Amino acid sequence: MQQNIMSFRELQKIAKQVSKGETPIKIAVLANHTTTFFCKALENYLLVEGYNPSIYEAGYDQIDITIIDNSSKLYKINPEIVIIFESSLKLKDNFYALKSNEERSHFSSRISDLINSRIAGLQSGNINSKIIYMSYELIDDQIYGNLFSKITHSFYNQLWKINNRLIEISEKENNFYVFDINKHLKNLNDYRDWASYINSDLHYSIDTHTHISYHITKFAKAFKGSFKKCLILDLDNTLWGGIIGDDGLEKIQIGSLGIGKAFTKIQKWAKELKNRGVILAVCSKNNEEIAKNPFINHNEMVLKLEDISVFVANWNNKADNIRYIQEVLNIGFDSMVFIDDNPAEREIVKQSIPEITVPELPEDPALYLPYLTNLNLFETVSYSKNDNDRTLQYQQEAERRKLISQVTNMDDYLKSLEMHGSISDFTPEDVSRIAQLTQRSNQFNLRTKRYTEDDIIKFMNSENYLTYSVKLKDKFGDYGLISVIILEKTSSNAFFIDTWIMSCRVLKRDVEYYALNKIVDDLLKLKINTLQGQYLETAKNSLVADLLEKLTFSKEKNDSIYSLNTNTYKHFKHFIL
């Protein structure tokens, strides 16, 4: 979906033309100002993105009453996401109502305590929602001008402190996320209609609400496991100025002078994304040796060959080359972003692979980076240390693909990989990675349950669950933690597969056989005769539609549940040591 930021009217028109998607998403919006247009725009963007949204808008300025009242509709609908959206204009009125400077100096502490009580209230309400808390708009009332930083009873001073407190809270609370409204408002002209504010309590213009909802939609999609994983880069006039094949190494534009600075900034941006875990690939119409030369020999290149997971430079159609990159990475086209300065090449890719995101770069390279960062293409809701190793892992996967062409059958290939595995209970050091896998995995995912780090810790500490984390390495490198299985005890004689997910990087390595053999052995030791499973279909997990049957589970009558008798189970052959 080539979605751009639209006006409210444009979005409304497009949303009327689409049907509700299969994937439900429930969001609650609690605010101290009018958010009708925000909620409608959010609903429309989610519709356009293929979801079936249900948006609950709490009563006007009823944030705390809604949270305190356990019988409120908030708890009845049990939303996946709760958005708390307070306007600084309303906050300013409350601040000015304080009579003494001492009270005003402690205003941020009071608001911080209120935020913590809201979090506690939502947690005690028996819902497991992600909380997105809008930061407070930095409204400078100009009472103290630039002296505000020294005046603790200045409203502007207190706003800065409140936003800093939000960050501190977010660092401690796993289910609490801060949405920085200020970085989005600064890109908008006339983001507030003062007449509408006075007459209708509309604190932001209708199109501003739409702009904010666009970015919230990206955030919500990331929570649902839909986000960009790979950045595919053209080279000539995209990563450097000029054409390497014609201009040569000395004449391409890159570095700290002139327009070369713009290309260097693009490279720095890509490098930071790579360090965060985004996969970088190259797709260029070029001779491969010539195309790689700047990466190896130009001393002002920020990106090096070791930063690139898949490097494709030839004279083939770019859409075909991107299909090859997708095969190597084994991720969906909708997880990929392709950047190319050439409008014709962009159009060919968009027409050939409509799922891929292809930004319409400005003609001026100086505008590349501001344009791309404003699109917020790589929204994420998780990060782990494992992300730093992702480039190396995909480079190793490319080596494995070369090996497969040299053997005659699958068994020989699997033997030649010299795989070694380990299966253990969840451990504290793996909690972040396990939670991330539940949030990111879409294809090999039996039931598509998304869990936070707090959820994973609860599973670890519960006697009603068995937990398994699977790690794998072979002669090319270490895959790390690649599969997560959570079993729930449903009776004295049975366990149910609550979660079974696996990284697509290890498909067709027989990891599922290796894991199930271990699970059945453990269940037999516990004198458990039955293991049950269920496949819940989504738009992306058809890969495991027949997994349970393949693993010799039998479907129960008139139900979606499958069962495996552990006493008659026959161990599967695999080549993992």
Image (spheres, rainbow, N blue to C red):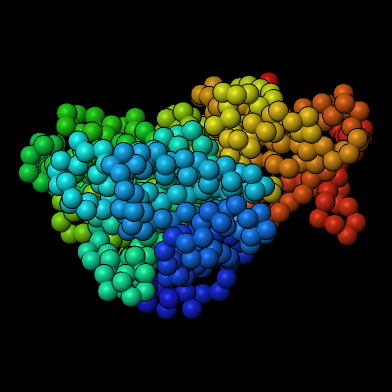
Asked if 285 appears above or below 575 in the picture, the reply is below
Identify the image quadrant of residue 520. top right
Q: Nearer the viewer, residue 368 or 9?
A: 9
Asked if 448 appears above or below 404 in the picture, the reply is below
Q: Nearer the viewer, residue 574 or 22?
A: 22
Image label count: 0
State the quadrant of the C terminus.
top right
Which residue: 16% across, 32% down? 300
Which residue: 86% across, 51% down? 555
Q: x, y percentage for residue 207?
A: 33, 69
From the viewer's perspective, is 213 left or right of 527? left
Q: x, y percentage for residue 470?
A: 65, 28
Which residue: 15% across, 40% down? 147
Q: x, y percentage for residue 347?
A: 32, 64
Q: x, y percentage for residue 208?
A: 33, 65
From the viewer's perspective, is 510 left or right of 232? right
| Residue 447 showing in the rendered view | yes
From the viewer's perspective, is 198 left or right of 253? right
Which residue: 47% across, 50% down? 132
